[in-house]
Image: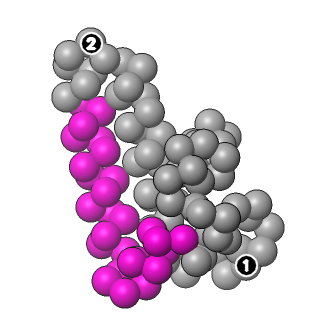
Amino acid sequence: MTAFDDVARGKGQARHGIALDLMQQPVMQIGAMVGPGHCLGQVVKKVQEAALLHGQGENAVARVELLGAINYAAFAILLLGGMDDTSDIPF
């Protein structure tokens, strides 16, 4: 739920949502153009950043990066057709 809250109401919505529903947000539009590899690459990047931050003792910031990785993985699932009905997603 924390990852969901971040993307639906937190940083993700503020920076990227621009009051658009999920399927119209840039992350999904870019994914539709180039495939789920865009989101999967972001997962890898976020996990790598989290590991580096953890190694520097920045665990709170590392946690935020991992929440981002969870969200990008969820976006990839959507792009792969893992959810046919997104009408109940509130963002």
**Residue at image coords 60%, 76%:** 23
Placement of the C terminus among the 4 image quadrants: bottom right
Q: Is residue 64 magenta?
A: no
Which of 82/22 is in front? 22
**Colouring of the image:** one colour
- Of callouts 2 and 1, which one flags the residue occurring earlier in the amino acid sequence? 2
Q: Is residue 82 visible?
A: no
Quarter of the figure with residue 86 = bottom right
Which of 49/26 is in front? 26
Q: Specify few, some or many for label 2: CA neighbours under 10 Å numbering under 14, 14-19, or 20 or more.
A: few
Q: Tell me residue 67's x, y (percent).
A: 48, 40
Q: Which residues are magenta?
A: 25-51
**Residue at image coords 44%, 58%:** 73
**Residue at image coords 36%, 18%:** 59
Quarter of the figure with residue 51 = top left
Q: Is residue 34 magenta?
A: yes
Q: Main secondary structure of the magenta part?
A: helix
Residue placed under numbered mark 1 in the picture: 85
Classify 26 as above or below 57: below
The amino acid on which the numbered mark 2 sits, given as a three-letter code, is Gly
Which of 27/54 is in front? 27
Residue lying furthest bottom: 33
The amino acid on which the numbered mark 1 sits, given as a three-letter code, is Asp
Image-based side of 85 in relation to 40, left or right: right
Classify 59 as above or below 83: above
Placement of the N terminus among the 4 image quadrants: top right
**Residue at image coords 25%, 25%:** 53
Residue placed under numbered mark 2 in the picture: 57
Classify 66 as above or below 82: above
Q: Secondary structure at mark 1?
A: loop
